Amino acid sequence: MFTRLKEEIAVVFERDPAARNTWEVITCYPGFHATLTHRFAHRLWHMGLKWLARMVSHVSRWLTGIEIHPGASIGRRFFIDHGMGVVIGETAEIGDDCTLYHGVTLGGTSWNKGKRHPTLANGVVVGAGAKILGPITVGEGAKIGSNAVVIKDVPPRATAIGIPARLVESQPAANGRFAAYAVMKELNDPLAKAIHELIDHCVDTDRRIEHILAELKRLGATVEEQQVSKLDAGYLNKIVD
């Protein structure tokens, strides 16, 4: 028990540079309080004391602003930073070393009984405001960007951003394992890459057409002049970035 408690405290110092001392963590961190309370409520739930477990969860939500259903399964060294507005559904499963920021929802999309909430593998980081919906799986070490809406499985070590979420390439975090808010430097968004390539293709096509028209005029052909606004490739590339 005390080993687990030390782990829960140590993980706060590992992932939050604002943490100054153990007493501050024990008394002032709602994510820490919500996690400890959930451990107790989860035991009550599996002992068959469903109402009591829900009541403990309800009181915890009132005190911390974090709602964790007592049926949810949560691994070791779980960290909720800030925490306000976090909702974790009944059949959600969270592995070891996962991090959630405020406003995250692990929600269900089905009225049917059974598995209807997400599964997060070990080491997943979910940014503020992200919604992960349905019985999907987020693979080990994956990162979900802030405000993303995830409705499909995310492969291990992938980064997902956007609405609906899409996978992007990214460089690893400086320490090799943790990125606050799931924010990574040099995100390589495939959608942005595709738009840049389309813009470049349009510019090249315009250049070829101008060359063709110039050659037709040189050969004596009559070319009807039309006022066509030119593509501002520099401006479009800038706003896409």
Image (cartoon, grey):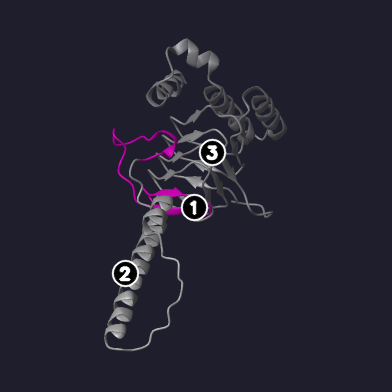
SS state under label 3? strand
- Callout 2 environment at 10 Å: few (<14), some (14 to 19), or many (20+)? few
Image side of residue 206 versus residue 90, left or right: left
Query: Which residue carries the number 2 mark?
Result: 204
Confirm or deny contact between disc 2 and disc 1 (CB under 8 A): no
- Callout 3 environment at 10 Å: few (<14), some (14 to 19), or many (20+)? some
Query: Which residue carries the number 3 mark?
Result: 73
Q: Amino acid at mark 3?
A: Ser
Image side of residue 100 versus residue 142, left or right: right
Q: Is residue 92 above or below residue 20?
A: below
Residue 161 or residue 1, whichever sits in front: 161
SS state under label 2? helix
Quarter of the figure with residue 182: top left
Q: Amino acid at mark 1?
A: Ala
x and y percent of residue 141 in the render? 37, 43
Distance between the Cα atoms at labels 1 and 3? 24 Å
- Magenta region includes residue 175: yes
x and y percent of residue 159 in the render? 40, 48
**Circle nearer the N terminus (2, 1):** 1
Magenta residue span: 156-184
Residue 175 or residue 231, whichever sits in front: 231
Q: Amino acid at mark 2?
A: Asp
**Circle nearer the N terminus (1, 3):** 3
Image side of residue 87 versus residue 207, left or right: right
x and y percent of residue 25 in the render? 48, 16
| Residue at image point 40% right, 59% down | 232
Q: Nearer the viewer, mark 1 or mark 3?
A: 1
Q: Nearer the viewer, mark 2 or mark 3?
A: 2
Q: Which mark is residue 165?
A: 1
Q: Is residue 128 above or below residue 25?
A: below
